[in-house]
Image (cartoon, rainbow, N blue to C red):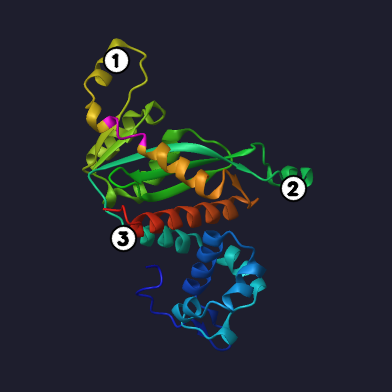
């Protein structure tokens, strides 16, 4: 699925190097198989069908150090494009949901933590999910734990073309966010924090059949942690984002090709 439709040759002579799609595909396979860089490249020498899909010969496979270095060098837009592309084989419906969870991270050294300002042991991870079959439409991760409404606004602005009805819990209660969604043709079904009787009245009018689709996000988080574990190996924010995107894309693809899908 992810190897279809590319225009770049897999490798260019001289300074061109390996195409982004080749490096991304190898990393996706590494995450799927849960292999180290060195072990994966060793195994690729025996996986003729996979190498053929990469449009390479075994002799042209990159060194594992090249794959590792390019992992950090690829721009954020490449990883976001990967995640968006991974949803093309998934059915989507008219209701989307947003929520957040925490992923543990490997403990960094005290020197590294001090230098980078790390103060949290968990990475706050926000996901936008379609509630029909559960594809992950977008992922955001943060080391500083900003408020849900701040993250939500960023994620939703990137995905307005994919939103119809958005469901979210009280953490995303914001008049500004609701107004923004309505102005862009999106129906917000977001619980109000109940400070007054008017807030309670708003909540009482919410369509339960729609709002009760919100736990789909929690199910998706559970599926990621069950499949890949709840601890991220990367220690930098950029590395953690890449790792989460790979996990989400693999989950989307395996869901799309599973016998029960659709």
Q: Please give the range of residues in magenta.
A: 211-215
* Outermost residue, right side: 111
Residue 200 lies in quadrant: top left
Q: Secondary structure at mark 2?
A: helix
Decide which of tag 3 and tag 1 comes sooner along the chain: 3
Residue hosting label 3 = 89
Above or below: residue 223 compared with residue 82: above
Q: Secondary structure at mark 3?
A: loop
- Frontmost residue, 113 versus 50: 50
Q: CA distance from mark 2 to mark 1?
A: 46 Å
Relative side of 168 to 231, left or right = left
Of residues 29 and 138, the one drawn nearer to the viewer in this rendering: 29
Classed neighbour count for the residue bearing mark 1: other residues with Cα under 10 Å, few (<14), some (14–19), many (≥20): some
Work out which residue is located at the far front of the displayed protein and give it. 259
CB atoms at circles 3 and 2 under 8 Å apart? no
The residue labelled by disc 1 is 200
Q: Residues within 10 Å of mark 3 (few under 14, many from 20)?
A: some
């Amino acid at each position: 699925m992810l190897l279809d439709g590319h225009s770049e040759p897999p490798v260019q002579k001289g300074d061109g190097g390996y195409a982004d799609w080749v490096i991304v595909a190898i990393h996706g396979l590494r995450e799927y198989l849960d292999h180290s860089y060195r072990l994966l490249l060793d195994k690729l020498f025996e996986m003729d069908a996979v190498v053929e899909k990469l449009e390479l010969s075994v002799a042209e496979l990159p060194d594992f150090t090249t794959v590792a270095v390019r992992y950090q060098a690829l721009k954020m837009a490449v990883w976001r494009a990967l995640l968006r592309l991974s949803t093309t084989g998934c059915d989507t419906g008219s209701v989307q949901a947003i929520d957040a969870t925490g992923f543990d991270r490997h403990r960094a050294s005290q020197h590294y933590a001090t230098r980078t300002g790390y103060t949290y042991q968990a990475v706050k991870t926000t996901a936008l999910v379609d509630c029909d079959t559960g594809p992950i439409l977008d992922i955001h991760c943060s080391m500083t734990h900003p408020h849900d409404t701040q993250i939500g606004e960023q994620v939703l602005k990137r995905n307005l073309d994919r939103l119809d009805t958005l469901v979210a819990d009280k953490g995303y209660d914001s008049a500004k966010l609701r107004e923004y969604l309505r102005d862009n043709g999106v129906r917000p079904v977001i619980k109000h924090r109940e400070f007054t009787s008017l807030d309670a009245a708003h909540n009482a009018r919410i369509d339960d059949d729609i709002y009760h689709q919100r736990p789909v996000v929690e199910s998706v988080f559970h599926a990621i942690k069950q499949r890949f574990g709840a601890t991220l190996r990367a220690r930098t924010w950029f590395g953690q984002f890449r790792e989460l995107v790979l996990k989400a894309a693999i989950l989307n693809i395996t869901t799309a090709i599973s016998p029960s899908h659709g």
